[in-house]
Structures are given as C-alpha cells and as structure tokens.
Amino acid sequence: MTLLRGKGLGLEVVLVGRDFAEALLELEAKLASQPGFYRGTEATAVYGDAEPAADQAEALRRVLESGGITLKGFAPATVVDGAEFERRRALRPRREVTLSDEARSLVADFAGARADIAQRRKRGEESVRRADLAAARPSAIPAPTLSVVEPPPGTLYHVGTLRGGQSLQQVGNIVVVGDVNPGAELTASGDIVVFGRLGGVAHAGAQGDANARVYALDLAATQLRIASCIAADAGERTGAAGPEAAFVRDGRILVAALDKLPHLEAQGAHS
C-alpha cells in the first residue's frame, strides 16, 4: 500500500500495517528522491490499532519537515489493515468511458493518418503531402492577356499669375487661377480655363481636337488657337469685360459671352 498519498487538499502518511521504523526509513528515502516536490503541503498520519508514541510522532514530524511538509496530526484508519484497504479499493466500480459514433470515427481517422505517415517515412517521402498548385490549376482557364493601357488625360491646376516668357503644357486640360500676362503661353490637348485675365497665347485642342474650348473671365488673348484654327486679337475691346468662351464654328474661331453660349450651341446644332 502507498506510504504517502494525496488526499483531498493535503497528504496522508499511511502507517497502517507497517513497522513504524521501516515506514520512517521508506518515507525519508522517498522525500530525498524528490526534494522540494511536496514543499508547502500538509499531511495527516493515519495509524491502525494504536496511535504512535510521542517520540515516534516527533521523529515523523522531523522527517516530514525535511521534505517541506507540515504534520497536521494523527487519525485512525477506517479499515482494519492495509490488505483490507487494498481489497476494498479493488472492489470499487470502474468508470466506463463511452465514445460517440463521431468520436469513434475520429479515432479511426487519426489511427489511419498515423499509419500513412509512418509508411511515407519508411519510403523516404515527406510525412505530409504538399499540394501541387501548378498541377491543380485548371488548364481550361486561359491566362489573362496583359496589355499597356494609356492613362486618361489629366488636368493641370495652376494657382498664380503667369508672367511673360512663362508657359504651361499639358496632355489634357489646363486650369489657371490667376492672370496670364502677354508673352505667356498655354498649350493643352483639351480645354483651357483661366479664372482671371487671359492676355497671352492660348492653344487648346493642340492634338487636333476641334471641340476643345478656351474659357476666361477676361478673354484678351494676343493669339487663340483651337486645333488647327488660329485667331489673333483684332484690337482693343469696347465695353466691359466679362466671362467668355472661344470655340470653333465652320472652320473658324468664335468668341461669345459665356451666358450666350448655350443659345449659340443650339443654333449650331440646327444649322
């Protein structure tokens, strides 16, 4: 029967059916083989017919303390001897563990997987198959064709006055927030919009787009170009300046007030 055993929240030193001196030596040897394992625990000494004498109790206390165990006290055994204790323990009903059908299938699966891995290792193969992504790719799906796509024209946004000798070029539109002084040049493949006075050269639709336009709050360009059409300033303007737009009609450049533009466009659509 076990000399030192766990019981509840503590330990039991079972002295039932043992010679006390032999039990003490066995206990001392057990604690020496596992130093510190039981440190900080408490133990109760279980005796049989007679409680150990005072000197025996003191000897037991010292041995237990050498292993870090505190002796709480003594208690009589509930069985006559060790053989009876073991007999009763053997008669206790064993708890049966019942597996569900799902659990049984998992056990079988794991067993089969282990056997498969063992066979692979014997053959010098990898334990786990690696997926062949190239072979798994459906051959019926053609690879996508790559082609270069030209980016759409953008808009150049400039804030500030453009002075004589300065120029802006853009594949797309140009927007200037400020004045364009005489001697400055704007060239765009799309529209030109000036939130200020346009007094320099403006070339819209520079790549041949005759539908391009030039807009300005004060359109006083020294030269206007839209696609292949050219118009030069004929002289000083009479009347107050206002927002205007330049566009191509019948092969020549026309300039109209911005608020009149929808009416002129309607006329052009019906002509």
Image (cartoon, rainbow, N blue to C red):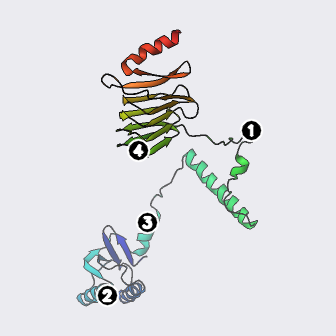
Q: Which residue is mark 3?
A: 89
Residue type, label 3: Arg
Report the amino acid beneath label 2.
Ser
Q: Are marks 2 and 4 in contact (CB under 8 Å)?
A: no
Is 245 above or below relative to 164?
Answer: above
- Residue depth check, mark 2 versus mark 4: number of the one nearer the observer: 4
Q: Earlier in the sequence, mark 2 or mark 4?
A: 2
- Residue carrying label 1: 140
3D distance between C-alphas at marks 2 and 1: 79 Å
Disc 4 marks which residue?
A: 164
Q: Where is 88 relative to 238, above or below?
A: below
For marks 2 and 1, the one nearer the N-term is 2
Whichever of labels 2 and 3 marks the residue nearer the N terminus, that label is 2
- Nearer the observer, 96 or 189: 189
Disc number at residue 125? none
First in sequence: mark 4 or mark 1? 1
Q: Nearer the viewer, mark 2 or mark 1?
A: 1
Numbered circles on residues, count: 4
Q: Is residue 80 visible?
A: no
User: Does the rendering let one see residue 264?
Assistant: yes
Alpha carbon distance from label 1 to label 3 = 71 Å
Q: Which residue appears at 50% of the width and 13% of the height?
A: 268
Amino acid type at mark 4 = Gly
Q: Residue at x 46, y 35 (%)?
A: 202
Percent of width and height locating residue 125: 73, 64
- Badge 3 crowding class, 10 Å Cα cut-off, few under 14, some 14 to 19, many 20 or more, is few
What is the spatial separation of the Cα atoms under label 3 and label 4, in whole angstroms?
111 Å
Q: CA distance from mark 2 to mark 3?
A: 31 Å
Give the camera-side residue of 230 and 235.
235
- Res 40 → quadrant: bottom left
Query: On the image, numbered disc 2 is attached to which residue?
Result: 66
